[in-house]
């Protein structure tokens, strides 16, 4: 229709009236719908498509484009490390919880992330707070800085904790980032 | 074969239940809200994952397993938001035990903002 004059729309999207429908989002909604019903049939797929379309037309979101890619090998590495980290950190929090008689001290550290992408920033933040031992207290999106509360960290553990978050960011970017994002990691000296 | 799966399922559910219990212990034992957020959110996610895995193994040939995946996914996506908001509010309203926080770079940043609020919005409280 007016696609020549309208602002560039994100890849893999179609336009319905004024609304831009992003197909990946629609696919995500469809998958969630089918999983909810627990069966893959014509009925669930068609109704899922209709409900997904309706949701996206009634509750439009700003187009999310993102430079989101999936690098299979790095993604696998990220997922494996994520599970390992979670198990390790769970043990650590449990040890703290059961060490009776000692009151755990903790620290709030600032971690300036290197990525410029809001999506990768958010993903990193979610991972940081899902992994035990760290809770996000404050987010500065202007400077892409996370403020993380680290359980049981004294002054000597602060640098270690900061390096851990940066390494997590690196894995997220290598798994899902665009080439530019990955290069930015290298140019800022990797994790140090 | 099903017997092996059953045993696996039972041990997963048991481990998950133990983790949830441990989260409860942490919740009571930890001194301030920020520390408590750690146990409220974390061993609980791991515990939930194990319980769901156990249920999934038990249900295995059934197609309803999908919903278990959804439960875990939404837990992973929503818990950090809740934890962040609770943590932020408690920090800003001074409900943290400052004697227990060794290094506090957020407080330093807030102090800097207060002295030099150029361009940045200073959100007090």
Image (cartoon, coloured by chain):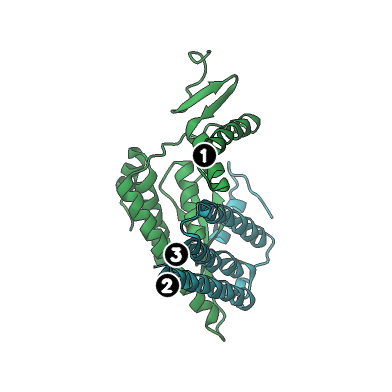
Q: Are marks 2 and 1 on the same chain?
A: yes
To which residue does mark 1 refer? A41
Q: Quadrant of the C terminus of chain A?
A: bottom left
Kindly report the distance in space between the C-alpha atoms of the residues bearing marks 3 and 2.
Answer: 22 Å
The picture quadrant where one finds residue B110 is bottom right
Chain coloured green in the rendered structure? A
To which residue does mark 2 refer? A156
Mark 2 falls on what kind of element? helix
Residue at figure coordinates x 58%, y 57% from the top left: B79
Total labels drawn = 3
Q: Earlier in the sequence, mark 3 or mark 2?
A: 3
Kindly report the distance in space between the C-alpha atoms of the residues bearing marks 2 and 1.
Answer: 57 Å
In the rendered structure, the colour chosen for chain B is: cyan
Mark 3 falls on what kind of element? helix
Residue at figure coordinates x 48%, y 58% from the top left: A128
Q: Locate residue A172 relative to residue B112 in the image: left or right.
A: left
Kindly report the distance in space between the C-alpha atoms of the residues bearing marks 3 and 1.
Answer: 36 Å
Q: Are marks 3 and 2 in contact (CB under 8 Å)?
A: no
Q: Earlier in the sequence, mark 2 or mark 1?
A: 1
Dot 2 alpha-carbon crowd within 10 angstroms: few under 14, some 14 to 19, many 20 or more? few
Q: Chain of mark 2?
A: A
Residue A101 position (above or below residue A90): below
To which residue does mark 3 refer? A86
Q: Chain of mark 1?
A: A
């Amino acid at each position: 229709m007016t696609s020549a004059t309208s602002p560039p729309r994100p890849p893999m999207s179609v336009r319905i009236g004024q609304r831009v429908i992003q197909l990946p989002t629609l696919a995500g909604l469809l998958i969630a719908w089918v999983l909810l019903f627990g069966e893959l049939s014509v009925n669930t797929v068609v109704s899922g498509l209709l409900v997904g379309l309706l949701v996206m037309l009634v509750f439009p979101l700003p187009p999310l484009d993102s430079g989101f890619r999936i690098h299979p090998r790095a993604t696998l590495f990220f997922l494996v490390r994520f599970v390992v980290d979670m198990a390790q950190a769970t043990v650590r929090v449990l040890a703290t919880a059961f060490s009776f008689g000692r009151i755990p001290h903790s620290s709030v550290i600032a971690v300036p992330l290197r990525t410029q992408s809001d999506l990768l920033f958010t993903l990193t933040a979610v991972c940081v707070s899902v992994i035990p031992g760290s809770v996000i207290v404050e987010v500065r999106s202007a400077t892409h800085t996370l403020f993380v509360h680290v359980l049981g960290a004294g002054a000597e553990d602060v640098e270690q904790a900061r390096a851990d978050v940066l390494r997590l960011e690196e894995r997220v970017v290598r798994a899902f980032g665009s080439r530019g994002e990955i290069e930015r990691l290298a140019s800022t000296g990797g994790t140090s | 074969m099903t017997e092996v799966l059953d045993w696996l399922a039972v041990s997963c559910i048991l481990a998950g239940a133990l983790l949830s219990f441990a989260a409860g212990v942490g919740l009571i034992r930890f001194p301030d809200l920020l520390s408590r957020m750690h146990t409220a959110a974390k061993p609980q996610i791991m515990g939930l994952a194990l319980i769901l895995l156990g249920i999934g193994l038990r249900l295995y040939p059934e197609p309803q397993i999908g919903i278990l995946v959804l439960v875990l996914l939404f837990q992973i996506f929503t818990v950090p938001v809740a934890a962040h908001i609770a943590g932020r509010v408690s920090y800003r309203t001074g409900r943290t035990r400052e004697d227990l926080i060794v290094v506090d770079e957020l407080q330093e940043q807030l102090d800097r903002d207060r002295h030099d609020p150029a361009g940045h919005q200073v959100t007090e409280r």
